[in-house]
Image (cartoon, helix red, strand yellow):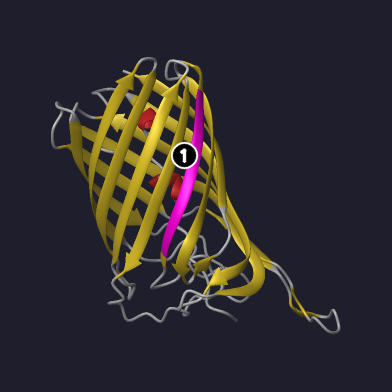
Amino acid sequence: MKKIFLIIALAFVFNNVVNAGGGWTQPKGALYLKLSEWWIVSNQHYTDVGLIDPNITSGIFNTSIYAEYGLTDRFTTIVYFPFFSRAFINNEVSGTTGEILTPGDAINSIGDTDISLKYALNTKGLIRTAATLTLGLPFGNDSGGALNNLQTGDGEFNQMLQLDASASYQIKNTTIYGTTYVGINNRNNGFSDEFRFGFELGAGLLKSKLWIIGRITGVESFKNGDLASDSNSTSVFANNSEFTSYGMEVAYKITPKFGISAGYASAFRGEIIFASPSYSVGVFFDLGK
């Protein structure tokens, strides 16, 4: 079967000013919670040379909790926990006879979990900077289904160091902000290390009740691992995956402490990833101190 697939858990990557993302940290005692659903379903993928090929329709759904808590004004703890993850693949059907060549399959489990500690390098000035250490915990299933080819995790423990720089501006009743980050992700179990980057621009309208956010994110593999790219080819996690994607999110605060959000992202170039968009919806709670 064809080489496929990695999509980063965008729900974790998509931090924004509403939940103190970028170079901002949560104030001491402040708590932010988000319950979200993220999914991608695809019948095509980017190959290892960046071309688009068809594949059996497959995908993954992640139901997750994301939380930020301010230990101090400088230190924020962050947890991304996909407590229900469903990976599936449809039947493989003969194009000439209609016969089912390989039956479809699905698995349900928890997913790989991220725990982070963010430190504000400065708390004053126009540009805010922060450093974040993220530990990727392999709680997901890396060999499920009848053929052991479905995954809700990649089975490896990784560590990522990320640097963020952000700034915000007030123009009458509109808040404009921009943020950028770079990161190095150290992976184990034969997976190649990665360079990650992102740019984000957002605007808070209606007295900061409505937020409109646009993003560019990317992953570049160092290709220094010894695990074959297609060793887990029917999962949504593969070695040496690369992409550059664009995305947007809309968040609306119904009350000062409660809101809803919806997001969209799609890769416009990639290697060994789905060539289809991902979607997310969520509710968030900004509980403050």
103 in magenta: no
Going by the numbered disc 1, the residue's amino acid type is Ile
Q: Is residue 6 above or below residue 169?
A: below
Q: Which residues are magenta?
A: 243-252
Could you tell me residue 235's position as x and y percent? 53, 69
Q: Count neighbours of disc 1 (C-alpha within 10 A) and say few if under 14, some if 14 to 19, many if 20 or more.
A: many
Could you tell me residue 115's position as x and y percent? 32, 46
Quadrant the C terminus occupies: top left
- Residue occupied by mark 1: 65
On the picture, is 9 further left or further right than 87? left
* Quarter of the figure with residue 106: bottom right
On the picture, is 202 further left or further right than 96? left
Quadrant the N terminus occupies: bottom right
Residue situated in front as seen by the camera: 76 or 39: 39
Residue situated in front as seen by the camera: 137 or 168: 168
Q: Is residue 62 above or below residue 34?
A: below
On the picture, is 88 further left or further right than 251? right
